[in-house]
Amino acid sequence: MEVYNLYVNSGTSYSLITLPLFLIQLVSVVLSVYTITSYANRRNQMRLCTLILILLVGWHLLATVFFLVLPDADKQESFGLHGFAVLPLVSILLTYLAKRAIRADEELVRSADRIR
């Protein structure tokens, strides 16, 4: 049994049971690109970063549920994680760092406005 974000390959058939994992990552990628391009509105960027963080943490929770549920469906097959499963963790870290930098930039702009 090979498990991917989009489908599960059991050797003889494909199942779309893991489609929500794919959709969550697709939405987070689209929101990330939009967040990067909306640099003029820092408050909106911070809100979107928070939403992306929630989506990615939800992805990990859902992936954990699939990790615990899918092996019970077929005891003879093994379920393994590939190296790419760590990429959402990297995305969580980078999104958090981006949110911190955006917040620091917003505070810098506000302090410069007070000096005037």
Image: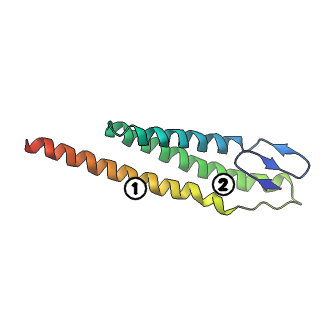
Q: Please identify the quarter of the rendering in which residue 25 is found.
A: top right
Label 2, label 1: how far apart the Cα atoms are = 24 Å
Q: Position of residue 112 (x, y in %)?
A: 14, 45
Q: Position of residue 24 (x, y in %)?
A: 60, 42
Are discs 2 and 1 less than 8 Å apart at CB? Answer: no
Q: How is the image coloured?
A: rainbow
Label 1: few (<14), some (14–19) or many (≥20) C-alpha neighbours in 10 Å: few
Residue 51 falls left or right of residue 43: right
Label 1 element class: helix
Residue 90 falls left or right of residue 113: right
- Check residue 54 in the rendering and tell me which mark sits there, or answer none: none
Residue pictured at 72% horizontal, 45% vertical: 6
Which dot, 2 or 1, sits closer to the camera?
1
Label 2 element class: helix
> Which one is in front, 54 or 98?
98
Residue 31 falls left or right of residue 105: right
Identify the amino acid type marked 1: Leu
Task: Please identify the residue farthest to the front as the structure is shown.
Answer: 37
User: Which image quarter holds the N terminus?
Assistant: bottom right
Identify the amino acid type marked 2: Thr
Q: Position of residue 84 (x, y in %)?
A: 64, 59
Q: Position of residue 110 (x, y in %)?
A: 19, 43
- Check residue 97 in the rendering and tell me which mark sits there, or answer none: 1
Residue pictured at 64% horizontal, 48% vertical: 62
Task: Name the residue tied to disc 2.
Answer: 64
User: Which image quarter holds the C terminus?
Assistant: top left
Task: Please identify the residue farthest to the right as the structure is shown.
Answer: 12
